[in-house]
Image (cartoon, rainbow, N blue to C red):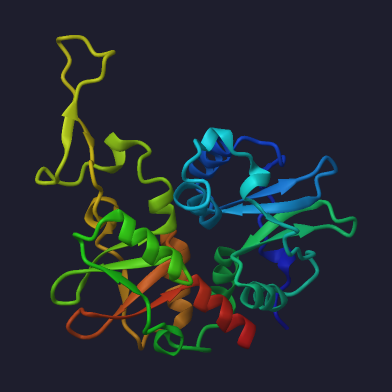
Amino acid sequence: MPPRVSSYYTRDIVAVRPNENLAHVRKLMLRYDIGRVIVVDEEYKPVGIITLSDLINALMGKYSHRPINTLTAKDVMTPDPKTITPRKSIKNAAHIMTRYNIGGLPVVNDEGTLIGIITRTDLTRAYAEHYKGAYRVGDLAREIYAKADPYHAIFHVARLAMLDPAGKVVVVDSDGKPIGIITRRDLAFANIPLEARLTRGKDRYRKLKKPDYLGRDKIVALREYLVPLARDIMTEDPVTIRPDTDAAEAARIMVTNGIGSLIVVDEEGRATGLVTKREIVKAIASL
């Protein structure tokens, strides 16, 4: 019998009211390293959900002309989110996530009050613990996925990420070997903070500035990318996996390393596919 949601959902919740400033919502996502925030009413019942995709759409799409601090949670949230109760099985949760292409479900009690959330990460952990031997990576991996050259502009990468089902873009070299990966999170938080995130190479196109608050005896170089490229924001040395590996091991690697995808490579190290938590959840729904 499949384990229940009660064994895997997260009880620590980050929730906001509908009128909360979107700039604050973005800070919460960054501070707590989460991909979604639940919007609740006065009775703490879910009325909406904001994901990284919603945030990127706001920043780069419909509301790109407006400062983020002039927007509220209700402006960009997906209303009336699907919910689930703790006594349901993880297979039921996987069915809902797969059918509606969503990455998380607010968990509610019998009165509809928010008590937690279960995400693809939680279901991936469940797969690693309960479904060894069910599938191999090659059975689940996608052969069609977003790829970019390291010198593609961030605007092109953003379009690719929004079109990819899992929001991942694999950066490959001229031989087709993966050298980096870009996620929607990388795009949403690409400029925070500049000095911490964008300091990977001395040969990158940049300008240097000295903050006004520094005295003459202190010299600090902060890099600001005028036109960010894929190589400026990608996570280098992405984790790869072979297609004959047990999918439960792939799930374990993702959970252990806090990553959402593994690049499938052939014997020469060339990228041939992508397996993400999304494929793991689909596997649970099919079992």
Residue that lies at the very extreme toward the right in this rendered image: 111
Would you say 173 lies left or right of 138 here?
left
Would you say 142 lies left or right of 96 here?
left
> Residue 198: x percent and y percent?
26, 43
Residue that lies at the very extreme toward the left in this rendered image: 203
> Residue 275: x percent and y percent?
42, 77
What is the quadrant of residue 149 in the picture?
Answer: bottom left
Q: Residue at 24% of width from left, 50% of height from top?
A: 232
- The total number of labels drawn is 0
What is the quadrant of residue 215 in the picture?
Answer: top left
The relative height of residue 77 versus residue 164 in the rendered view (above or below) is above
Residue 189 at least partly seen: yes
The relative height of residue 141 versus residue 10 in the rendered view (above or below) is below
Residue 14 at least partly seen: no
Q: Residue at 75% of width from left, 63% of height from top?
A: 83
Q: Residue at 43% of width from left, 49% of height from top?
A: 188
What is the quadrant of residue 216 in the picture?
Answer: top left
> Residue 100: x percent and y percent?
65, 73
Quadrant for the N terminus, please.
bottom right
Would you say 134 lies left or right of 225 here?
right
Q: Which of the two residues, 12 or 219, is positioned nearer the viewer here?
A: 219
Quadrant for the C terminus, please.
bottom right
